[in-house]
Image: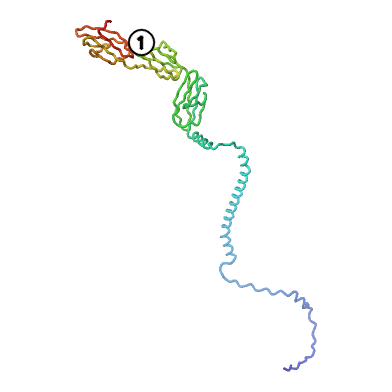
Protein backbone atom coordinates (compact mmCIF):
# COMPACT_ATOMS: atom_id res chain seq x y z
CA UNK A 1 0.00 0.00 0.00
CA UNK A 2 1.43 3.40 -1.01
CA UNK A 3 1.51 5.93 1.84
CA UNK A 4 -0.06 9.25 0.75
CA UNK A 5 2.25 12.20 0.58
CA UNK A 6 2.70 14.32 3.73
CA UNK A 7 1.59 17.93 3.76
CA UNK A 8 4.13 20.16 5.43
CA UNK A 9 2.61 23.13 7.25
CA UNK A 10 4.50 26.37 7.76
CA UNK A 11 5.86 27.07 11.23
CA UNK A 12 3.61 28.96 13.65
CA UNK A 13 4.67 31.43 16.22
CA UNK A 14 3.77 30.01 19.60
CA UNK A 15 3.21 32.39 22.47
CA UNK A 16 4.77 31.49 25.67
CA UNK A 17 2.33 29.44 27.79
CA UNK A 18 1.81 29.99 31.45
CA UNK A 19 4.11 28.09 33.76
CA UNK A 20 2.65 24.70 34.55
CA UNK A 21 3.85 21.83 36.58
CA UNK A 22 5.86 19.31 34.76
CA UNK A 23 4.11 16.27 33.58
CA UNK A 24 5.80 14.10 36.15
CA UNK A 25 4.34 16.21 38.93
CA UNK A 26 0.88 15.69 37.62
CA UNK A 27 1.52 12.03 37.31
CA UNK A 28 2.75 11.72 40.91
CA UNK A 29 0.11 13.97 42.44
CA UNK A 30 -2.99 13.66 40.34
CA UNK A 31 -5.62 16.26 40.82
CA UNK A 32 -8.46 15.27 43.15
CA UNK A 33 -11.52 14.05 41.44
CA UNK A 34 -14.53 16.25 41.72
CA UNK A 35 -16.83 15.29 44.60
CA UNK A 36 -19.58 13.06 43.52
CA UNK A 37 -23.03 14.34 43.98
CA UNK A 38 -24.84 12.78 47.03
CA UNK A 39 -27.12 9.97 46.07
CA UNK A 40 -30.74 10.72 46.02
CA UNK A 41 -32.39 9.16 49.12
CA UNK A 42 -34.80 6.42 48.35
CA UNK A 43 -37.45 5.00 50.68
CA UNK A 44 -36.31 1.36 51.11
CA UNK A 45 -37.81 0.55 54.61
CA UNK A 46 -36.02 0.54 57.99
CA UNK A 47 -32.38 1.42 57.81
CA UNK A 48 -29.60 -1.09 58.48
CA UNK A 49 -28.64 0.77 61.67
CA UNK A 50 -32.15 0.46 63.06
CA UNK A 51 -32.17 -3.25 62.28
CA UNK A 52 -28.86 -3.76 64.07
CA UNK A 53 -30.08 -1.84 67.12
CA UNK A 54 -33.25 -3.93 67.34
CA UNK A 55 -31.21 -7.15 67.13
CA UNK A 56 -28.88 -5.89 69.86
CA UNK A 57 -31.81 -5.14 72.17
CA UNK A 58 -33.08 -8.68 71.65
CA UNK A 59 -29.76 -10.47 72.16
CA UNK A 60 -28.24 -8.44 75.02
CA UNK A 61 -30.65 -9.61 77.82
CA UNK A 62 -30.08 -13.27 76.89
CA UNK A 63 -26.34 -12.72 76.84
CA UNK A 64 -26.48 -11.01 80.24
CA UNK A 65 -28.53 -13.85 81.74
CA UNK A 66 -26.16 -16.53 80.48
CA UNK A 67 -23.20 -14.51 81.73
CA UNK A 68 -24.80 -14.38 85.23
CA UNK A 69 -25.41 -18.14 85.20
CA UNK A 70 -21.85 -18.77 84.10
CA UNK A 71 -20.52 -16.51 86.85
CA UNK A 72 -22.62 -18.34 89.51
CA UNK A 73 -21.41 -21.73 88.29
CA UNK A 74 -17.83 -20.56 88.46
CA UNK A 75 -18.36 -19.29 92.04
CA UNK A 76 -19.92 -22.60 93.15
CA UNK A 77 -17.14 -24.61 91.55
CA UNK A 78 -14.53 -22.42 93.21
CA UNK A 79 -16.23 -22.81 96.64
CA UNK A 80 -16.40 -26.58 96.23
CA UNK A 81 -12.77 -26.73 95.23
CA UNK A 82 -11.67 -24.67 98.25
CA UNK A 83 -13.94 -26.76 100.56
CA UNK A 84 -12.48 -30.04 99.32
CA UNK A 85 -8.97 -28.67 99.68
CA UNK A 86 -9.70 -27.59 103.27
CA UNK A 87 -11.20 -30.96 104.22
CA UNK A 88 -8.18 -32.74 102.77
CA UNK A 89 -5.97 -30.65 105.03
CA UNK A 90 -7.98 -31.05 108.27
CA UNK A 91 -9.24 -34.64 107.96
CA UNK A 92 -5.89 -36.29 108.84
CA UNK A 93 -5.73 -34.29 112.07
CA UNK A 94 -9.29 -35.20 113.03
CA UNK A 95 -8.68 -38.86 112.25
CA UNK A 96 -5.49 -38.89 114.32
CA UNK A 97 -7.02 -37.21 117.41
CA UNK A 98 -10.27 -39.20 117.41
CA UNK A 99 -10.30 -42.12 119.93
CA UNK A 100 -10.75 -45.63 118.67
CA UNK A 101 -14.35 -46.82 118.66
CA UNK A 102 -15.41 -50.44 118.56
CA UNK A 103 -17.91 -51.68 116.03
CA UNK A 104 -20.66 -52.00 118.63
CA UNK A 105 -20.41 -48.33 119.64
CA UNK A 106 -22.79 -46.92 116.97
CA UNK A 107 -25.60 -49.17 118.14
CA UNK A 108 -25.10 -48.21 121.79
CA UNK A 109 -24.93 -44.51 120.91
CA UNK A 110 -28.12 -44.77 118.90
CA UNK A 111 -29.88 -46.48 121.80
CA UNK A 112 -28.73 -43.82 124.29
CA UNK A 113 -29.87 -41.03 121.97
CA UNK A 114 -33.28 -42.66 121.60
CA UNK A 115 -33.66 -43.02 125.36
CA UNK A 116 -32.73 -39.40 125.97
CA UNK A 117 -35.13 -38.20 123.32
CA UNK A 118 -38.07 -40.38 124.31
CA UNK A 119 -37.44 -40.93 128.03
CA UNK A 120 -37.43 -38.93 131.23
CA UNK A 121 -35.46 -38.13 134.37
CA UNK A 122 -35.52 -39.27 137.99
CA UNK A 123 -34.27 -37.09 140.87
CA UNK A 124 -33.93 -38.87 144.23
CA UNK A 125 -33.35 -37.35 147.67
CA UNK A 126 -33.55 -38.90 151.13
CA UNK A 127 -33.37 -38.01 154.80
CA UNK A 128 -30.80 -38.94 155.93
CA UNK A 129 -28.70 -38.63 152.79
CA UNK A 130 -26.48 -41.41 151.50
CA UNK A 131 -29.20 -44.01 151.00
CA UNK A 132 -28.49 -46.52 148.26
CA UNK A 133 -30.77 -46.16 145.23
CA UNK A 134 -31.84 -49.40 143.58
CA UNK A 135 -33.79 -48.87 140.35
CA UNK A 136 -35.56 -51.87 138.82
CA UNK A 137 -33.30 -54.19 140.80
CA UNK A 138 -30.04 -52.45 139.77
CA UNK A 139 -28.04 -50.23 142.12
CA UNK A 140 -27.52 -46.74 140.60
CA UNK A 141 -25.74 -44.81 143.36
CA UNK A 142 -26.52 -42.95 146.60
CA UNK A 143 -28.74 -39.99 147.36
CA UNK A 144 -28.90 -37.25 146.26
CA UNK A 145 -28.94 -38.78 142.78
CA UNK A 146 -30.21 -37.89 139.30
CA UNK A 147 -30.80 -40.59 136.71
CA UNK A 148 -31.42 -39.52 133.10
CA UNK A 149 -32.48 -41.30 129.95
CA UNK A 150 -35.09 -43.53 131.61
CA UNK A 151 -37.57 -45.23 129.33
CA UNK A 152 -41.20 -44.25 129.67
CA UNK A 153 -43.43 -46.40 131.85
CA UNK A 154 -43.42 -47.64 135.46
CA UNK A 155 -40.25 -48.27 137.46
CA UNK A 156 -39.55 -49.62 140.95
CA UNK A 157 -37.36 -47.45 143.19
CA UNK A 158 -35.91 -48.68 146.49
CA UNK A 159 -33.98 -46.56 148.99
CA UNK A 160 -32.09 -48.53 151.59
CA UNK A 161 -29.89 -47.47 154.51
CA UNK A 162 -29.14 -48.43 158.09
CA UNK A 163 -32.40 -46.67 159.07
CA UNK A 164 -34.49 -48.96 156.89
CA UNK A 165 -35.80 -49.41 153.37
CA UNK A 166 -38.42 -47.49 151.40
CA UNK A 167 -40.01 -48.69 148.16
CA UNK A 168 -41.80 -46.55 145.62
CA UNK A 169 -43.38 -47.16 142.22
CA UNK A 170 -42.94 -44.25 139.80
CA UNK A 171 -44.13 -43.49 136.27
CA UNK A 172 -41.76 -41.90 133.78
CA UNK A 173 -43.24 -39.60 131.10
CA UNK A 174 -41.31 -38.47 128.05
CA UNK A 175 -39.23 -35.32 128.58
CA UNK A 176 -40.40 -34.91 132.19
CA UNK A 177 -38.66 -35.29 135.57
CA UNK A 178 -39.97 -37.27 138.55
CA UNK A 179 -38.89 -36.27 142.07
CA UNK A 180 -38.66 -38.80 144.91
CA UNK A 181 -37.91 -37.31 148.34
CA UNK A 182 -38.23 -39.80 151.21
CA UNK A 183 -37.57 -39.62 154.93
CA UNK A 184 -36.40 -42.97 156.24
CA UNK A 185 -37.65 -43.47 159.80
CA UNK A 186 -39.57 -46.20 161.67
CA UNK A 187 -43.19 -47.24 161.40
CA UNK A 188 -45.46 -49.52 163.45
CA UNK A 189 -47.14 -52.93 163.16
CA UNK A 190 -50.36 -53.85 164.96
CA UNK A 191 -51.16 -57.60 165.21
CA UNK A 192 -54.80 -58.64 165.57
CA UNK A 193 -55.32 -62.33 166.48
CA UNK A 194 -58.13 -64.35 168.12
CA UNK A 195 -55.63 -65.57 170.70
CA UNK A 196 -52.33 -64.51 172.16
CA UNK A 197 -49.27 -64.90 169.96
CA UNK A 198 -45.56 -64.48 170.45
CA UNK A 199 -43.95 -62.25 167.77
CA UNK A 200 -40.37 -62.61 166.59
CA UNK A 201 -38.15 -61.83 163.59
CA UNK A 202 -34.97 -63.69 162.67
CA UNK A 203 -35.03 -65.39 166.08
CA UNK A 204 -35.31 -62.04 167.93
CA UNK A 205 -38.42 -61.57 170.10
CA UNK A 206 -40.41 -58.40 169.45
CA UNK A 207 -42.43 -56.73 172.19
CA UNK A 208 -45.54 -54.61 171.78
CA UNK A 209 -45.82 -51.15 173.29
CA UNK A 210 -48.67 -49.70 175.37
CA UNK A 211 -50.79 -49.43 172.21
CA UNK A 212 -50.21 -53.12 171.41
CA UNK A 213 -48.02 -52.13 168.49
CA UNK A 214 -44.46 -52.93 167.45
CA UNK A 215 -42.08 -50.22 166.16
CA UNK A 216 -39.95 -51.41 163.23
CA UNK A 217 -37.66 -49.84 160.61
CA UNK A 218 -39.34 -49.21 157.27
CA UNK A 219 -39.13 -51.99 154.74
CA UNK A 220 -40.11 -55.62 154.29
CA UNK A 221 -40.35 -57.79 157.44
CA UNK A 222 -41.16 -61.48 157.92
CA UNK A 223 -42.83 -61.77 161.33
CA UNK A 224 -43.17 -65.17 163.02
CA UNK A 225 -46.37 -65.52 165.07
CA UNK A 226 -46.63 -68.48 167.46
CA UNK A 227 -48.96 -69.92 170.10
CA UNK A 228 -47.40 -72.92 171.78
CA UNK A 229 -50.53 -74.11 173.59
CA UNK A 230 -52.48 -74.20 170.32
CA UNK A 231 -49.58 -75.69 168.40
CA UNK A 232 -50.01 -72.86 165.94
CA UNK A 233 -47.25 -71.07 164.02
CA UNK A 234 -47.44 -68.77 161.00
CA UNK A 235 -45.19 -66.27 159.21
CA UNK A 236 -46.61 -62.95 158.03
CA UNK A 237 -44.93 -60.95 155.24
CA UNK A 238 -45.45 -57.26 156.01
CA UNK A 239 -44.13 -53.95 154.64
CA UNK A 240 -43.56 -51.17 157.14
CA UNK A 241 -43.78 -47.59 155.87
CA UNK A 242 -42.20 -44.56 157.58
CA UNK A 243 -44.49 -43.07 160.20
CA UNK A 244 -47.40 -45.35 159.26
CA UNK A 245 -49.12 -48.19 161.12
CA UNK A 246 -49.51 -51.49 159.27
CA UNK A 247 -52.15 -53.89 160.56
CA UNK A 248 -51.63 -57.66 160.46
CA UNK A 249 -54.73 -59.81 160.92
CA UNK A 250 -54.22 -63.41 161.98
CA UNK A 251 -56.87 -65.74 160.57
CA UNK A 252 -55.86 -69.29 161.50
CA UNK A 253 -57.35 -72.26 159.69
CA UNK A 254 -60.11 -74.28 161.33
CA UNK A 255 -59.43 -77.39 163.33
CA UNK A 256 -61.86 -80.26 163.97
CA UNK A 257 -63.94 -81.33 166.97
CA UNK A 258 -65.17 -84.84 167.72
CA UNK A 259 -67.68 -85.49 170.61
CA UNK A 260 -68.69 -88.94 171.81
CA UNK A 261 -71.20 -90.09 174.47
CA UNK A 262 -72.74 -93.37 175.70
CA UNK A 263 -76.20 -92.28 174.58
CA UNK A 264 -77.39 -89.75 171.99
CA UNK A 265 -77.00 -86.27 173.43
CA UNK A 266 -77.28 -82.72 172.11
CA UNK A 267 -74.00 -80.82 171.75
CA UNK A 268 -73.71 -77.05 172.05
CA UNK A 269 -70.55 -75.07 171.14
CA UNK A 270 -70.20 -71.61 172.67
CA UNK A 271 -74.00 -71.51 173.18
CA UNK A 272 -74.87 -72.69 169.67
CA UNK A 273 -76.27 -76.16 168.99
CA UNK A 274 -74.08 -78.08 166.54
CA UNK A 275 -75.77 -81.52 166.54
CA UNK A 276 -76.07 -84.81 168.49
CA UNK A 277 -73.52 -87.36 169.50
CA UNK A 278 -71.70 -88.93 168.04
CA UNK A 279 -70.23 -85.87 166.29
CA UNK A 280 -67.25 -86.66 164.12
CA UNK A 281 -64.69 -84.04 162.89
CA UNK A 282 -66.87 -80.96 163.11
CA UNK A 283 -65.06 -77.78 162.02
CA UNK A 284 -64.03 -75.61 164.97
CA UNK A 285 -61.87 -72.53 165.20
CA UNK A 286 -58.66 -72.50 167.19
CA UNK A 287 -58.80 -71.16 170.70
CA UNK A 288 -60.74 -71.57 173.92
CA UNK A 289 -64.31 -72.83 173.72
CA UNK A 290 -67.16 -73.98 175.98
CA UNK A 291 -68.90 -77.24 175.05
CA UNK A 292 -72.24 -78.32 176.59
CA UNK A 293 -73.53 -81.88 176.33
CA UNK A 294 -77.24 -82.25 177.17
CA UNK A 295 -78.55 -85.78 177.80
CA UNK A 296 -82.09 -86.99 176.98
CA UNK A 297 -83.19 -86.78 180.62
CA UNK A 298 -82.11 -83.11 180.79
CA UNK A 299 -78.81 -83.57 182.57
CA UNK A 300 -76.04 -81.35 181.27
CA UNK A 301 -72.28 -81.36 181.39
CA UNK A 302 -70.11 -78.35 180.52
CA UNK A 303 -66.52 -78.52 179.28
CA UNK A 304 -63.99 -75.67 178.79
CA UNK A 305 -61.57 -76.78 176.12
CA UNK A 306 -58.77 -75.36 174.02
CA UNK A 307 -58.86 -76.45 170.42
CA UNK A 308 -55.53 -76.26 168.70
CA UNK A 309 -54.18 -76.98 165.25
CA UNK A 310 -54.40 -80.72 165.86
CA UNK A 311 -57.85 -82.36 165.82
CA UNK A 312 -59.62 -82.30 169.20
CA UNK A 313 -61.71 -85.19 170.65
CA UNK A 314 -64.07 -84.96 173.68
CA UNK A 315 -65.56 -87.95 175.47
CA UNK A 316 -68.66 -86.69 177.32
CA UNK A 317 -68.74 -89.78 179.56
CA UNK A 318 -65.28 -89.22 180.92
CA UNK A 319 -64.90 -87.70 184.37
CA UNK A 320 -63.95 -84.08 184.56
Q: Is residue 161 above or below residue 25?
A: above
In the image, taking residue 16 as reference, residue 314 lies left or right, namely: left
- Coloring scheme of the render? rainbow
Q: Nearer the viewer, residue 45 or 191?
A: 191
Q: Secondary structure at mark 1?
A: loop
| Residue that lies at the very extreme toward the top in this rendered image | 319
In the image, taking residue 154 as reference, residue 4 lies left or right, namely: right
| Residue that lies at the very extreme toward the left in this rendered image | 297
Q: Is residue 48 above or below residue 28?
A: above
Residue 139 placement (x, y as % from top left):
50, 25
The residue identified by callout 1 is 229
Residue 6 found in image quarter: bottom right
Residue at (21% x, 6% y) in the render: 299
Residue 3 placement (x, y as % from top left):
74, 93
Residue 23 found in image quarter: bottom right
Q: Is residue 150 above or below residue 77?
A: above
Q: Nearer the viewer, residue 237 or 147?
A: 237
In the image, taking residue 61 as reference, residue 282 lies left or right, namely: left
Count residues near mark 1 (Cα–Cα under 10 Å), then give few for <14, some for 14-19, many for 20+: few
For the N terminus, the quadrant is: bottom right
Count of numbered marks: 1
Residue 257 placement (x, y as % from top left):
28, 13
Residue at (51% x, 30% y) in the render: 148
For the C terminus, the quadrant is: top left
Residue 279 placement (x, y as % from top left):
25, 14
Residue at (44% x, 29% y) in the render: 154
Residue 89 found in image quarter: top right
Q: Nearer the viewer, residue 271 or 200?
A: 200
Amino acid sequence: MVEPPRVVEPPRVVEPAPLVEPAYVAAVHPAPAPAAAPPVARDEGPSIAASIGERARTILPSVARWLAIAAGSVAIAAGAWFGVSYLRRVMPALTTSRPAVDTAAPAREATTTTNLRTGGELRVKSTPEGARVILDGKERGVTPLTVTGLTTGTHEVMLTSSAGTVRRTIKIIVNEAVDVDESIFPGWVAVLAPFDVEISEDGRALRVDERDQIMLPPGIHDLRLRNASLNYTTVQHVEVKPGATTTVRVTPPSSTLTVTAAEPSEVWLDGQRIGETPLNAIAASLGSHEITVRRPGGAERRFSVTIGATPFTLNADASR
